[in-house]
Image: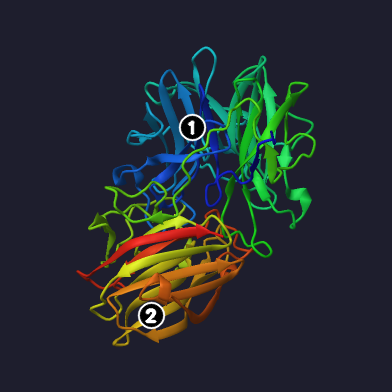
Amino acid sequence: MAERTFTNPIIPGFYPDPSILRVGDDYYLIQSSFNLFPGIPVFHSKDLVNWEQIGNALDRPSQHFVPGDATNGGVMAPTIRYHEGVYYIIVMNFAIGSNVMLTATDPAGPWSDPILLPDIPGIDASIFFDADGKCYAQGTGSFDEDLNLLPDIFAPGKRGIWVCEFDIKTMKAISPKKYVWDCALNGAPSPEAPHLYQKDGWYYLIIAEGGTEHFHSVTIARSREVMGRYEGFQGNPILTHRHLGYDYPLANVGHADIVELPDGSWYGVALASRFLDGYHKNLGRETVLFPVTWENDWPVFCPLTGKVELSYPAPACLPEAPVRPEPAFDDFDADSLAPYWVMIGTPDPCYYELKDSSLVLNLNPRSVIDKPYPMRIAMTEKPDIQLLSFVARRQRSFNFDFTAALAFTPQAEGESAGILLDHNGNEYLLEYGLFDGEKKIRVSEILIHVSGNFFENNQKAEKTVTVLAELPCDADALVLRISERDHRLLFAAGETEESLTTLPAEGDARKLNVPVDGGMVGSIIGVYATATGKESKNQAAFGWTCYQDN
């Protein structure tokens, strides 16, 4: 019998900051969702290789609290843990400036409303249950010369990791926060993502450092006491790809979590990025899986090669457990959207409905929810943000076709509907609408150019809109398609799927994510409708969509 293998990434597309958990024979994965709703996707597996999304932890608008312009903010770096029948997710929501806790008795949901954790500061907070049942919280922060935690987590000074005892019943810290470690590399930027583990009398602290771009890494320290001073491993970093240069097919590797299998073997998950024609990170940061062994009471990530490979043998102790693949086709006959559909920002008020076997979008514009949050883009000049009615899926391959059947009659100037490919505000649109008094099919490119320094609060942004093609059209029903072949974006339209005609326009997907911008999100593609900022009672109905990787 041929050896079973798996391919990285195990969950392709914009699924960063993975946290993994085993409960009995079941494995669960969650990831950051930033400004996307529903938030915090939840995956389940029996064999670590085949994963099925079973829900989202933040699946109700009342839980979410993220405005649509929180591009690189919002909900990030969650950790999932389990104790005495209850599942816990701790996560930072930058939109409200607080860590929160969610609880559930079933990872598929429902999850509780967020419980605010005002005395758990810092990004990437985590929790750890010790063998005696005590719970501890970990987080990041800035410390003064006496290693006291400063109230401003981004204040100049020594950056590092703190630990405190945490009462899981009252959701409050019950001991002072103690500085336990800074990082492996002297003065390394962004020591974060702390996760604690206990094994063979040692407490192990795994963190990320070096920032989430090319110099990202995973490092480790240990202590005999959970709140003791931790000593770093001489072999740090235990995982990084920064030394492999810019041509290795996986980069930005970091933000790891590990799990023990029933036979005593270990595996780890981390984020990593694949790149499009150079260093264009269109798919964002994805979830990868790799083996872990132990030598001399220290873990060895990716043994023998020291890097995350594109393929590995499947875990030998776990029988294969296939799952239903994420469907390509959706005819919207269900009572609710499938869990892979997402929107930008909390959909409040709700702008979509499922009726008559269609996804129906309102054209009314949405306003940004006016709630303060510390990660708002610090731009003295920022382009107007138009929050469209937009329902999308994560792009999972550099070669895909996204097709949608649209029923729509534009009634006023600027009303349009169609397909939108978005990456952090940079967009390609294939739309049908009323422009300059005439019904047309139009292909547009929208790019945001940012200059200045975020930390000096002098960033400026300029938005450019380029119409790539425009054709007269008068139809009540159309089929539209956006395709990507490596970096080439192609556009097609027709009255039926069999009569699609390629339009005289071509986009460049590399423009959606330029290397100098970096960024923490990935591309999403879906259907949208807009009245271009005007009030409208019109609607656009999408009878079906199909997303296929090629």
The answer to which quarter of the image holds residue 230 is top right
The foreground one among 307 and 8 is 8
Q: Picture quarter containing residue 97?
A: top left
- Residue 145 visible in image: no
Query: How far across and how far down the image is residue 151, in percent?
Result: 49, 38
Horizontal and vertical percent position of residue 103: 38, 30
Name the residue rendered at 68%, 51% in the picture: 251
Task: Tell me if label 1 and label 2 are in contact, CB under 8 Å.
Answer: no
Rendered residue at 60%/24% (across/down):
261
420 to 311, vertically: above or below: below
Within 10 Å of disc 1 (Cα), the crowding (few <14, some 14-19, many 20+) is many
Mark 1 to mark 2: distance in Å? 46 Å
Q: Residue at x 41, y 76 (%)?
A: 499
Q: Return the residue found at the far left.
A: 537
Q: Secondary structure at mark 1?
A: strand
Q: Secondary structure at mark 2?
A: strand
Quadrant of image for the C terminus: bottom right
Q: Nearer the viewer, residue 297 or 401?
A: 401
Residue lying at the far top of the rendered structure: 132
Disc 2 target residue: 441
Seen in the picture, residue 204 relative to 118 is either above or below; the reply is above
Residue 339 placement (x, y as % from top left): 39, 46
Q: Which tag is nearer the camera, tag 1 or tag 2?
A: 2
The answer to whether residue 408 of the structure is visible from this angle is yes
Q: Amino acid at mark 2?
A: Ile
Query: In the drawing, does residue 248 fall left or right of residue 399?
Result: right
Residue that numbered label 1 is attached to = 80
Q: Amino acid at mark 1?
A: Ile
- Give the quadrant of the N terminus: top right
Mark 2 surroundings: few (<14), some (14-19) or many (≥20) residues within 10 A: many
Q: Percent x, y for residue 396? A: 54, 55
Q: Judge left or right: residue 459 versus residue 338.
A: right
